[in-house]
Amino acid sequence: MLMLVANKPKIKKKQKQKDRKNLFARVEAMFRMQRLFDEGVPVRYFPFGIFLMLILLTYIGNNHYAERMQRKIQRLESEVEDLRADYTTLKADYMFSSKQSEVARKVQPMGIIESQQPPIKLILSDDED
């Protein structure tokens, strides 16, 4: 069984409006800033405003400079770490290649051999009067 129903307009319920003030309305009510600017911005506040802007710009510039220096320091620290590793490797290679056995092995193709006799000590005597 099919029943047809006529369209009825929806009746909107009235919402209760509460006296809610937002944050800015409360701040304005507390400090009454509107009366300060009724006749425009007072000229006596310009030097202080300029001073605050200069301090703000200095603060922002200092933060940018500090961040840039921090990135540079990190980059240089990683470079120093790489150079230290290279130095350690080269030093180890040098120490190995300067061992007596390694030097003897490297000069053997040139026909230079290690002496088996200890060095002779020469002594000059003062008896030549």
Image (tube, grey):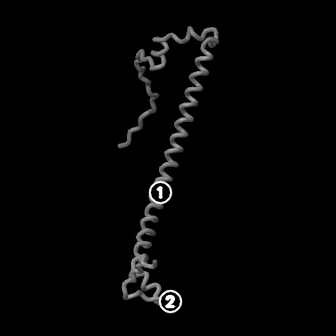
Give me the C-alpha separation between circle 2 and circle 1.
40 Å
The residue positioned 45% from the left and 64% from the top of the image is: 87
- On screen, residue 35 versus residue 21, left or right, reads right
- On screen, residue 58 versus residue 88, left or right, reads right
Where residue 83 appears, as percent x and y from the top left, is 47, 61
**In the rendered structure, are the residues bearing label 2 and label 1 in contact, judged by CB atoms less than 8 Å apart?**
no
Callout 1 crowding tier (Cα within 10 Å): few <14, some 14–19, many ≥20:
few
Under mark 2, the amino acid is Met
Viewer-proximal residue, 69 or 42? Answer: 69
Q: State the count of labels.
A: 2
Viewer-proximal residue, 103 or 68? Answer: 103
Q: Is mark 2 on a helix, strand or loop?
A: helix
- Image quarter where the N terminus lies is top left
Where residue 89 appears, as percent x and y from the top left, is 43, 68
Residue denoted by label 2: 110
Under mark 1, the amino acid is Val
The residue positioned 44% from the left and 33% from the top of the image is: 6
User: In the rendered image of this protein, does residue 61 appear above or below residue 13?
Assistant: below
The residue positioned 50% from the left and 53% from the top of the image is: 76
Residue denoted by label 1: 80
Q: Is mark 1 on a helix, strand or loop?
A: helix
Q: Say which quarter of the image contains residue 12.
A: top left
Where residue 45 appears, as percent x and y from the top left, is 60, 14
Callout 2 crowding tier (Cα within 10 Å): few <14, some 14–19, many ≥20:
few
Viewer-proximal residue, 33 or 10? Answer: 33
The residue positioned 52% from the left and 37% from the top of the image is: 63
Q: Nearer the viewer, mark 2 or mark 1?
A: 2
User: In the rendered image of this protein, does residue 111 appear above or below residue 9?
Assistant: below
